[in-house]
Each structure stands twice: as C-alpha cells, then as structure tokens.
C-alpha cells in the first residue's frame, strides 16, 4: 500500500510536491494541478515541471468528502511528458 500525504489546500499540495522533488534531487520549479473536466479539482494528477515545462514527476491527488486533499507520497517519473499551454500548440 502506498503512503498518502494529507494537505488542507491545493497550494499546500503543490508546495509538498516541490519539497519531495527537492528531497529526491529532482530539479523542479513549478507544479500543475489540472483537475477534472468539471474544473472542481476533486481528483487529478499533480505534475512537477522544470523551467522549460518538461514534466519531471507526477502523482495522483484527490479530495476526500471532508474537503482534505490527499496525494500519493510515491512519485512517478514522467520523462516523456511536457506541459504545453493552448497558445503554444
């Protein structure tokens, strides 16, 4: 069973993911937390990226019924992904 990290807000999850990357020696400068198609951030993937938008690590997140966010403590390398904004396509 994978360990979970509990966070009160998405902002706290982003900070925790950057902290985990730093502990593992991964050069990440930003975190993206795209949520569901409804835009409710009920669940999704957190992506830690470098300054060029290359995804370095990812982990799933979800929000419990009491509003607490949880993320997996185990990070997954994602070397083939890149974050592209709609204006860069």
Image: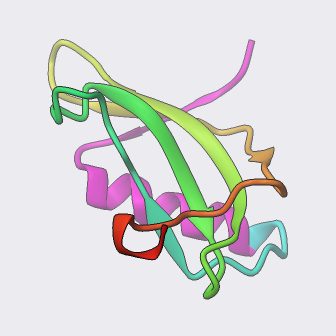
Above or below, 35 against 37 in this view is: below
- Figure colour scheme: rainbow
Q: Is 35 on the left-hand or right-hand side of 1?
A: left
Above or below, 48 against 60 in this view is: below
Location of residue 85 by image quarter: bottom left
Q: Residue at 84% of width from left, 75% of height from top?
A: 25
Location of residue 76 by image quarter: top right
Q: Nearer the viewer, residue 50 or 17?
A: 50
Indicate the position of residue 5 as horizontal and vertical percent values: 51, 37
Indicate the position of residue 46 as horizontal and vertical percent values: 50, 47
Q: Residue at 18% of width from left, 12% of height from top?
A: 65
Above or below, 33 against 16 in this view is: above
Q: Point out the stretch of residues depicted in magenta.
A: 1-22
Q: Residue at 65% of width from left, 47% of height from top?
A: 58
Above or below, 2 against 41 in this view is: above
Q: Residue at 25% of width from left, 28% of height from top?
A: 37
Q: Is 17 on the left-hand or right-hand side of 63?
A: right
């Amino acid at each position: 069973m994978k360990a979970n990290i509990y966070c009160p807000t998405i902002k706290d999850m982003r900070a925790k993911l950057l902290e985990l990357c730093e502990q593992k020696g991964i050069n990440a400068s930003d975190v993206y937390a795209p949520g569901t198609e409804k835009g409710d951030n009920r669940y999704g993937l957190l992506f830690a990226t470098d300054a060029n938008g290359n995804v370095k690590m990812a982990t799933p997140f979800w929000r419990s019924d009491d509003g607490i966010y949880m993320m997996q403590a185990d990070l997954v390398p994602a070397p083939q992904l890149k974050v592209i904004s709609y204006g860069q396509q």
